[in-house]
Image (spheres, rainbow, N blue to C red):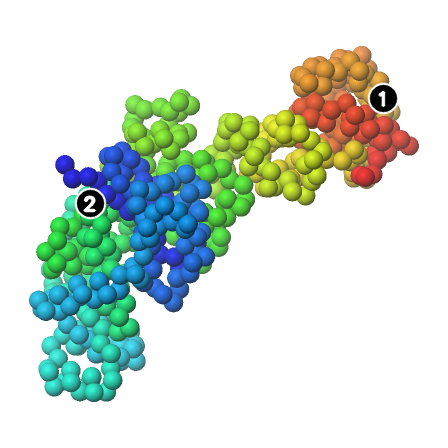
């Protein structure tokens, strides 16, 4: 049996897109399931828009998601680069063979002539397409154009009408008529650079790709590419086309419509867990087998390794996927709570650089993160959630002082708690909370009248993590300093 070989082949003309990342995941899982090879290559024939910063973003983004590849591109890594711009002579050599065999011809139409042709078609309400005007040029006409200094492009002949058919790995039987492909297509531009549809076919032949899994926006490209495989007398790979990702208003996810929300790096910067992004993207269009549950006891939450074992391309939906930010946030909150505390703490450090982390040991920082992570949706929120910990004293807003700390009951709660600090087992959040509850019973004060004054005095807010956890994280010295400041003159202290 032929070894399965798949690839992800982004163009470095922009940052790593959510849709590209999902396609990469499906190719990666397909390769892993079939013990095949997953290849990364860069389709960089668009030399005007390609940029090394996008190459780095794509590679870094795929690595952040936890993907590795068996062959392909890496910056400073072990893999030799696969770049189309390094194969210009090879593409032209193959194009010359098509020219010799009558499958291609030289087109001398200028950009201005082609623009005028399209404008005329537009004015007449016709489909925009090349009119094949250079297909049967005489030797005399070619000589005339060359004498004028015109540089020809190579065009591939597309006979019409004919049906191009294939059995799609995801969508089933697909038929595309060649009359819908826009006329004879350019395969080598007049500047000598291969076009996408030609270069990708040669690359897939050279790299012995067995399967091409990509978005359904490539269906017409697939029809063109199958014609090229046939003309080159080479076996085509199996194709599978996923539905695209749309928003709730039926708009395709795009930089123009959705800005940075479409880029993987946005989610990395915002503090999303890569495990959550991977889980969510895989699940947008794929469902596990009906009788399968993960180690979490659900078919919603699964790791990349679990998905490798059960992935089946036939279970990828034919329909569009829906991007649901609320669902993604649900996944991320789950992973923030369930990943090892040490992992979440290490990932949280870049979001806490405004604070002096030398105030606490790594164990104390883990304790702080553990206290607040249940209330987070993404790690970028931890700065606000953890602010209460740093510094001896804390700012208490005037309205909070007046509404929460000014009553007699509030002063009783703060005073009795201050007097009972020696009884509190600060290493045990539940034990600390039990002491506070016992004091409340003795004072006849409960609920928010008991907890809010303490929260306000200790953190400057009536909201936040569990009170016992908050006090345990702060420790006896900071708790004592803040309670004293809050009792001073009946007001909260100022942050120092």
The answer to whether 402 appears left or right of 225 in the picture is right
| Depicted 321 relative to depicted 185: above or below | above
Q: Give how far apart the Cα atoms at labels 1 and 2 are.
A: 75 Å
Task: Answer left or right for 489 relative to 366.
Answer: right
Q: Quadrant of residue 415?
A: top right
Nearest to the eye among marks 1 and 2: give it.
2
- Of residues 331 and 345, the one drawn nearer to the viewer in this rendering: 345
**Residue that extends furthest to the left in the rendered view of this protein:** 101
Q: Nearer the viewer, residue 348 or 435?
A: 348
> Which of the 4 image quadrants contains residue 26?
top left
Quadrant for the C terminus in the image: top right
Mark 1 lies on residue: 415
Q: Is residue 33 left or right of residue 493?
A: left
Which residue, given by chain and number where applicable, does mark 2 sit on? 210
Determine the residue positioned at 67% across, 17% down.
428
The disc placed on residue 208 is none
Q: Residue at x 68, y 43 (%)?
A: 354
Rendered position, 195 above or below 219: below
Kind of element beneath mark 2:
loop
Quarter of the image with the N terminus in it: top left
The percent position of residue 219, horizontal first and vertical second, equals: 24, 53
Residue 322: x, y in percent? Answer: 39, 43
Compared with 124, 80 (above or below) is above
Q: Residue at x 64, y 40 (%)?
A: 352
């Amino acid at each position: 049996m032929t070894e399965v070989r798949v690839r992800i082949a982004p163009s470095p003309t922009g940052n790593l897109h959510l849709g590209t990342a999902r396609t990469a995941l499906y190719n990666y899982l397909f390769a892993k399931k079939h013990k095949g090879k997953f290849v990364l290559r860069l389709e960089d024939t668009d030399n005007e828009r390609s940029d090394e910063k996008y190459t780095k973003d794509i590679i870094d983004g795929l690595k952040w998601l936890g993907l590795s590849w068996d062959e392909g591109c890496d910056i400073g890594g072990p893999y030799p680069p696969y770049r189309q711009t390094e194969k210009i002579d090879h593409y032209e050599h193959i194009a010359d063979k098509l020219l010799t065999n009558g499958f291609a011809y030289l087109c001398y139409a200028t950009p201005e002539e082609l623009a005028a042709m399209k404008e005329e078609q537009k004015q007449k309400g016709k489909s925009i397409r090349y009119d094949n005007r250079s297909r049967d040029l005489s030797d005399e006409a070619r000589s005339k154009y060359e004498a004028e200094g015109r540089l020809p492009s190579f065009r591939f002949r597309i006979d019409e009408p004919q049906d191009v058919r294939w059995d799609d790995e995801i969508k089933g039987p697909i038929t595309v008529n060649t009359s819908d492909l826009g006329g004879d297509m350019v395969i080598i531009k007049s500047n000598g650079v291969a076009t996408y549809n030609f270069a990708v076919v040669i690359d897939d032949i050279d790299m012995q790709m067995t399967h091409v899994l990509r978005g359904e926006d490539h269906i017409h490209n697939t029809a063109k590419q199958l014609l090229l495989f046939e003309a080159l007398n080479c076996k085509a790979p199996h194709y599978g086309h996923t539905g695209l990702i749309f928003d709730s208003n039926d708009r395709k996810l795009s930089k123009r419509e959705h800005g940075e929300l479409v880029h993987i790096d946005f989610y990395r910067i915002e503090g999303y867990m890569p495990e959550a992004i991977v889980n969510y993207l895989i699940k947008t269009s794929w469902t596990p087998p009906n009788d399968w549950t993960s180690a979490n006891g659900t078919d919603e939450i699964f790791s990349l390794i679990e998905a490798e074992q059960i992935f089946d391309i036939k279970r990828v939906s034919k329909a569009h996927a829906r991007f649901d930010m609320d669902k993604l946030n649900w996944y991320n909150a789950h992973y923030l709570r369930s990943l090892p505390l040490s992992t979440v703490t290490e990932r949280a450090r870049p979001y806490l650089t405004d604070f002096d982390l030398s105030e606490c040991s790594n164990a104390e920082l883990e304790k702080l993160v553990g206290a607040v992570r249940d209330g987070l949706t993404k790690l970028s929120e931890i700065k606000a959630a953890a602010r209460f910990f740093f510094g001896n004293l804390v700012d208490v807003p005037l309205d909070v002082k007046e509404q929460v700390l000014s009553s007699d009951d509030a002063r009783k709660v703060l005073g009795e708690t201050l007097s009972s600090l020696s009884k509190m087992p600060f290493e045990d959040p539940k034990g600390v909370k039990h002491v506070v509850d016992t004091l409340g019973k003795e004072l006849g004060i409960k609920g928010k009248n008991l907890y809010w004054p303490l929260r306000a005095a200790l953190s400057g807010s009536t909201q936040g993590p569990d009170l016992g956890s908050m006090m345990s994280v702060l420790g006896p010295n900071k708790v004592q300093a803040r309670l004293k400041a809050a009792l001073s003159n009946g007001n909260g202290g100022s942050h120092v």
